[in-house]
Image (tube, rainbow, N blue to C red):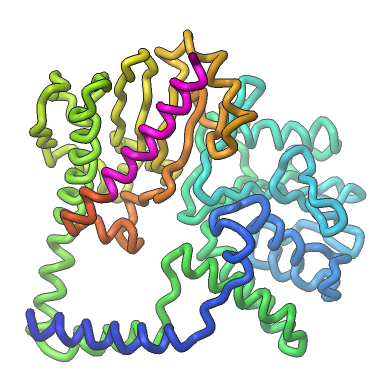
Amino acid sequence: MEYFLKELNLIQKEYEMLKKREERFNIFSALHKEHDERRLHSRFISVLLQPKGKHGKGIVFLKLFISQIEALKHFIYNENTLVYPHENDKKENNNIDILIINRKEKQCIILENKIFAGDSNLETGGQLERYIEHAIVNEGIPENSIYVIYLTMDGHEPSKESLNKFENFENLFIYSYEVLILPWLDECLKEVIDQPFLRESIIQYKKLIQKMTGNSTSIEERLAYKELIGRSEENMSSVKKLIDNFKHVKWHTINDFWSNLQNQIIIESTYELVKPFDKNINSNKSNNCIIDITHYEVYRKGQKEKQKCEIQFKTQEGIVVKIKYSANMDTFYFGVPEEGNELFKTYIMDLEKKYEEYKLNNEKGMLLYKIFNDNIKFNDFGKRETFNLINSDYNRKKAEESFGEIKEMTNVITKNSR
């Protein structure tokens, strides 16, 4: 096993050296946050989709995009098909991330782009419900001629609340960036071989997506790993043993993180634990929070909706704070729920003008929330940030950093409410 790991490490170092020699500057990540779905991802995708865009390729990119989805084969498009937002007007149509519409044929494609955010459901209706109704009522498009693409990093489904009365909407297509966008970009690159600026822009955007989806390993590197594993029975046996036991490693790792985070809350003398991660813990004085590992069976594939990573505590001023990992949205966030915070509602709503990093009313049942700076993907140990949590020191450090963000928010609310 030790020899195998040494060989594995040598291969990894070899390909890391090759990556270091590559040009590392990326214009997209330099100008925007990598997860900026509106100003980065939706804008760049919509620019390519423009039939009359400055890229000069006409309907080529739009045609290639539509051809990726078999169910769109009846969608009629031409030079007069409109794509919102567009280069001359970067404003969305009715807040829809990307709207492709053929008003003459009364057809449209609604593309809802989710990077790390959840659905923006309001009292006036679910997010996708509002968009579909807009197409029907304001654009006069029949329901069966409306196509909705729900695009996310991991291919998760929209919430039931988002679709609401359109829960059984037939033309809903759920895609991940890896399945839809990367293959489309590959096809686009074939059309711009003689256009260096456009070609390099697409290449850089593709590399950004590969980085975000953990899909940046080269084919050569993957084949080198395969060759190493198959070199001997001992190697194959060692890898199988790791695979068979890794699910338990994941459960223990997640358990440790939430225990560490909960301990931070318990140690803080001005906080009272209201809803512990381990429901068997009743005292906020305890310093030994051991979570029953059976809780982590909810992380097994197909049971994401049962995931229960949530902690609630109350500040000295009486503000209830929720910390949650939403498996359906693959989002690790914290904030102030409506329930239990009625007295602070007015103060919290005033924060919108002062603190742009906090989002208001975009998450069901929340007055205010913020996605953690390190949006840990607890369901995906293929992500380096998640995998590193296996290291105990790193795990504790990340829990402390997360708690620091929470304290910063509670201090802001407390200061604002005085």
Q: Residue at x 77, y 45 (%)?
A: 92
Looking at the figure, which quarter contains the N terminus? bottom left
Rendering coords of residue 390 (x, y %): 20, 57
> For this rendering, which residue is in front, 104 or 129?
129
Rendering coords of residue 169 (x, y %): 62, 38
Q: How many marks?
A: 0
Against 70, residue 355 (above or below) is: above
Against 116, residue 210 (above or below) is: below
Residue 180 sits in quarter: bottom right
> For this rendering, which residue is in front, 59 or 339?
339
Q: Main secondary structure of the magenta part?
A: helix
Which residue reaches farthest top? 343
Is residue 398 visible in the rendered image? The answer is yes
- Compared across the picture, whether 79 is left or right of 128 comes to right
Report the magenta residues as a range: 398-418
Rendering coords of residue 165 (x, y %): 61, 27
Is residue 365 visible in the rendered image? The answer is no
Residue 242 lies in magenta, yes or no? Answer: no
Q: Residue at x 85, y 66 (%)?
A: 53
Residue 417 lies in magenta, yes or no? Answer: yes
Q: Residue at x 22, y 51 (%)?
A: 395
